[in-house]
Image (cartoon, helix red, strand yellow):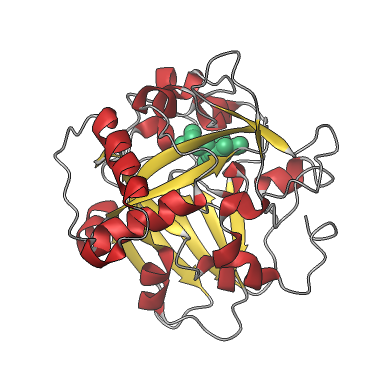
Amino acid sequence: MKNYKYSEVTPEKVYNKRRKFIKSVGLGLGSLTLSSMSLLNNAHSLENNSELTSYKDITTYNNYYEFGTGKGDPYKNSQEFKIKPWNISIEGEVESPITLSAEEILSLYPSEERIYRLRCVEGWSMVIPWMGFSLSKLLNKVSIKTEAKFVEFESVYDPEQMKGQRYPVLNWPYREGLRIDEAMHPLTTIVTGLYGKALPNQNGAPLRIFVPWKYGFKSAKVIVKIKLVKKMPTSSWMKASPREYGFYSNVNPNVSHPRWSQSSERVVGGSLLSPRVETQMFNGYGDEVANLYSGMDLKKYF
Ligand SMILES: Nc1nc2c(c(=O)[nH]1)N[C@H]1C(S)=C(S)[C@@H](COP(=O)(O)O)O[C@H]1N2
Ligand SMILES: [Mo]
């Protein structure tokens, strides 16, 4: 995937066509390059619902409470947000804590295209061609101590620029977390862009996390701190409503939210008449991640 270069402005139609082509190639893997094989893998887990969501929908229908709670607020309110200079610290239970600028991170780790489904806990989904790289690459740099069992992600706190933070909608700054093995899984991504372009502010620039098999809120935007810790962190959503939002929050059609079913989802960008589609266990990434939870009661650890 690393060598797969798109022009800066590849239109989304071309992406969609290419993906159809790759699917139609079927099992003729012999002639495919490594890069298109990765795309094929993605296409594989996307069979139910394989069209990429449009750039417009991905960038104007957002959840980003720092900039307001309406879906259109982040696009409207985040355009002037300053993302330079930007530093991210990796600290806590590590041998060698480090602070890197966003530019350093971008130049140290080349981004590749990663087409993943996003399933929001509210019951809608998108298919997004992210740019990014595995978080494990960054974590390997700091030598994690054996005492570390979890990773905590902290978003920026800047009520001057983020007017949503002037209200106690959530416990600011936005916090999320993963178990170490989840954080080290190759699908767990540091996102640097989308559709081959820089990450728009409303999607969490300069850098955000993306965890494809979990509900969208697990994927913290605009991160400034990655902290290795001994105890399970309490995320902002757990703090807001522990009955509704658990630490794991794996996409699971069999475990309802207390106020609605999670068995199906609305595909953003479809027409008003489009039927809802069935939600897949682990958002379709079960082959890759189910082993992380073997023997666990996923109703209890929701
Ligand atoms: N810092 C921060 N990160 C956040 C959120 C937020 O409000 N603040 N919303 C989450 C939710 S609920 C979802 S569904 C995704 C949405 O990502 P997108 O707007 O790029 O689609 O971001 C997640 N990350
Ligand atoms: Mo969400």
Residue drawn 17% across the image and 32% down it:
9
Question: Can you see residue 161?
Answer: no
Residue nearer the viewer, 46 or 58: 46
Task: Tell me which residue sits at (53%, 26%) in the image.
Answer: 268
The relative height of residue 76 versus residue 182 in the rendered view (above or below) is above
Q: Position of residue 89 (x, y in %)?
A: 40, 62
Quadrant for the N terminus, please.
Answer: bottom left
Q: Quadrant of residue 100?
A: bottom left
Residue 224 vs 125, above or below: the answer is below
In the rendered view of the protein, which quadrant contains the C terminus?
bottom right
- The answer to whether 236 appears left or right of 100 in the picture is right
Q: Quadrant of residue 228?
A: bottom right
In the drawing, does residue 128 fall left or right of residue 249?
left
User: As drawn, which residue projects farthest toward the bottom?
Assistant: 146
- Quadrant in the rendering for residue 295: bottom right
Give the x, y percent position of residue 239: 75, 46
Q: Residue furthest top?
A: 272
In the image, 102 versus 297, the foreground residue is 297
Q: Is residue 134 visible?
A: yes
Q: Is residue 37 above or below residue 137?
A: above
In the image as oriented, which residue stretches furthest toward the left?
Answer: 7
How many marks on residues?
0
Q: Residue at x 52, y 54 (%)?
A: 211
- For image coordinates 48% across by 79% down, the residue present is 94
Tell me where residue 18 appears, x and y as whole percent: 27, 41
* 167 left or right, relative to 20: right
